[in-house]
Amino acid sequence: MSFSTCCLKTFKWNGTPTGQIGTLANNQTYIASPPPPSSGPNSNPESTTAILIVHDLLGWSFPNARLLADHYAAEANATVYIPDFFGGEVLPFEPLIAGRFNEVDLPAFKERNTREIREPEIFQCAQALRGRYDVVVAVGFCYGGWAVFRLGAQRVNLDHSGVEGRPLVDAIAAAHPSLLTKEDIDGVSVPVQILAPELDQIFTPELKAYTFESLQRRGVPFDWQHFPGVEHACMTRGDENKPGERRALERGKNAVVAWVKQVEQKY
């Protein structure tokens, strides 16, 4: 399991998350709620959509991720969940923001959070949402990228009939995914959105080309968003000191919101 320090380069935004802390399956979870239903000329229907965010290495409590969840909830009219998939462990933000990566024991952290360890609870959280919402979309950033592809390959039966039913999630979005394999790519069967920075040492040009070819060959609906001039981790970092990065983050946020709305119209 490999990462680059680019996964950890970050920039903390201003703003205060407005969601609540709850539980999903057995995981502590940040929950951002949509606006209350309303009627009239600018009516807001009751939401029946959930967005499951699988976080990056900075975890479920990173303020940027929570602020993104708040935007998704308000703009996509969805309930957004960010469960803690690192068992209560949080990498320290300040050394990472300052670029002092030597202060973080990343190899040990990786061993405690392998795919094999975390996949079952990620599936459990998605299954909990599947039984409660009409539409479930999984969004993964960096570390979460492999996970949403795996979610997009699973089907579930809720009546215990033994017959596979609908997909565990209705669609996925992956932003600069990490730990992604060709097997993951070939397994996904639900609509896929890719947010792909041009400069990425992890989601390499070869892997990008393979993803595009596989989805096209297998007839999987997909939306490919290319972000020129920006690098891995830009979608949650949004550093206004890096040319084009804050704009890329805003465009990425808008793309996910539009994708969720499109998925709600049912492919």
Image (cartoon, rainbow, N blue to C red):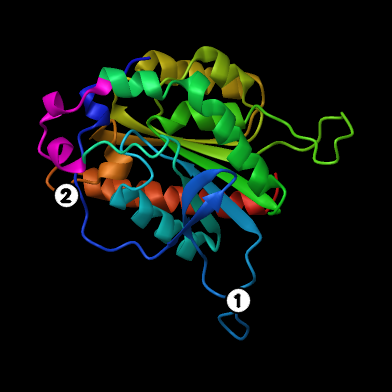
- Above or below, comparing residue 250 to residue 40 in the picture: above
Determine if the magenta segment contains residue 95: yes
| Residue 203 visible in the current orientation | no
- Above or below, comparing residue 249 to residue 121 in the picture: below
- Is the N terminus in the top left, top right, bottom left or bottom right quadrant? top left
Q: Find the magenta span and give its range.
A: 93-106
**Residue count near mark 2 (Cα–Cα under 10 Å), binned few <14, some 14–19, many ≥20:** few
Label 1 element class: loop
Give the residue type that dot 1 points to: Pro
Residue at position x 61%, y 86% in the image: 40
**Residue count near mark 1 (Cα–Cα under 10 Å), binned few <14, some 14–19, many ≥20:** few
Left or right of 139, for residue 220: right
Report, in whole angstroms, how far the alpha carbon at label 2 lies from the one at label 1.
Answer: 35 Å
Residue at position x 58%, y 28% in the image: 120
Label 2 element class: loop
Extreme residue toward the bottom, this view? 40
Q: Mark 2 points at which residue?
A: 240
